[in-house]
Amino acid sequence: MDERREEAQDALRFRIWSGYYEPDEVFDIVNDEVFEEDGENEDWLRQAIDLEFRKKRKAEQEWPAVTDCDRLDRVFESLRGQGILTRHRCGLTIQDGLGVIDQLYKEAGGEQSGLVGYCFYHLQDMEAAMWGEAGLWLAFGGFPPSQGRAVQVGQLVRKEFEQAGFTVEWDGTSNSRILLKGFRWQRRSPAKP
């Protein structure tokens, strides 16, 4: 397999197993990013995407009825109801994510929004969880930014995730992130049309 096809295989595998993308979206992204829409690899790419989706859908049959990703979604929804801005796949890194959160907070009305804090994970956190490293790391903080507010938000986030059955590691300070230890990334594929 040539180098670009290996790169494409990794890129499509990541997107498919993330559970966020439809086959056509995977094709468009990988074809653009890896092959620069050269037209030479389109048939191969469509076949590789189809094969990987079939592998994932077969694996999904063995997953529990409620996965860690399902519980994550429910906790994020609960946190939103308590004034916490939550975001999945928020940027590539912490700094990217903080920039996105800042923008979303401003768009929501800033201090007038009623938001008291935020919680997110970024793409690198998601990728680490997908491939079985440590668990899922969560960033959090308060609005307006302060150590005291951040710790309060962290306590709320920890409580919600523990109530949802997660094993949570956190040192109780605003200087560290929260780890959902042993998190298994199992987000089901979008429903077939």
Image (cartoon, rainbow, N blue to C red):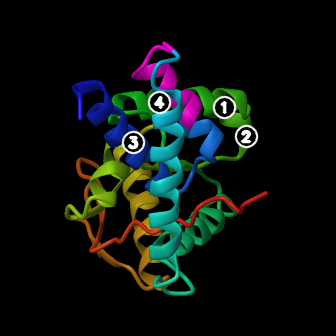
Residue at the disc numbered 4: 30
Amino acid of disc 4: Val
Q: Residue furthest right?
A: 193
Q: Earlier in the sequence, mark 3 or mark 2?
A: 2
What residue do we see at 34% from left, 71% from top?
A: 183
**On the rendered image, what quadrant is the N terminus found in?**
top left
User: Residue 67: image x %, image y %?
Assistant: 50, 78
Looking at the image, do the residues carrying marks 4 and 3 touch, with CB atoms under 8 Å apart?
no
Amino acid of disc 3: Leu
Q: Earlier in the sequence, mark 3 or mark 1?
A: 1
The residue carrying pointer 3 sits among few (fewer than 14), some (14 to 19) or many (20 or more) residues within 10 Å by Cα, namely some
Mark 1 vs mark 4: in front: 4
Mark 3 vs mark 1: in front: 3
Q: Which residue occupies the foreground of this view, 145 or 104? A: 104
Looking at the image, do the residues carrying marks 3 and 2 touch, with CB atoms under 8 Å apart?
no
The residue carrying pointer 2 sits among few (fewer than 14), some (14 to 19) or many (20 or more) residues within 10 Å by Cα, namely few
Looking at the image, do the residues carrying marks 4 and 2 touch, with CB atoms under 8 Å apart?
no
Residue at the disc numbered 2: 113
Q: Earlier in the sequence, mark 1 or mark 4?
A: 4
What residue do we see at 66% from left, 35% from top?
A: 111
Q: Which residues are magenta?
A: 27-38
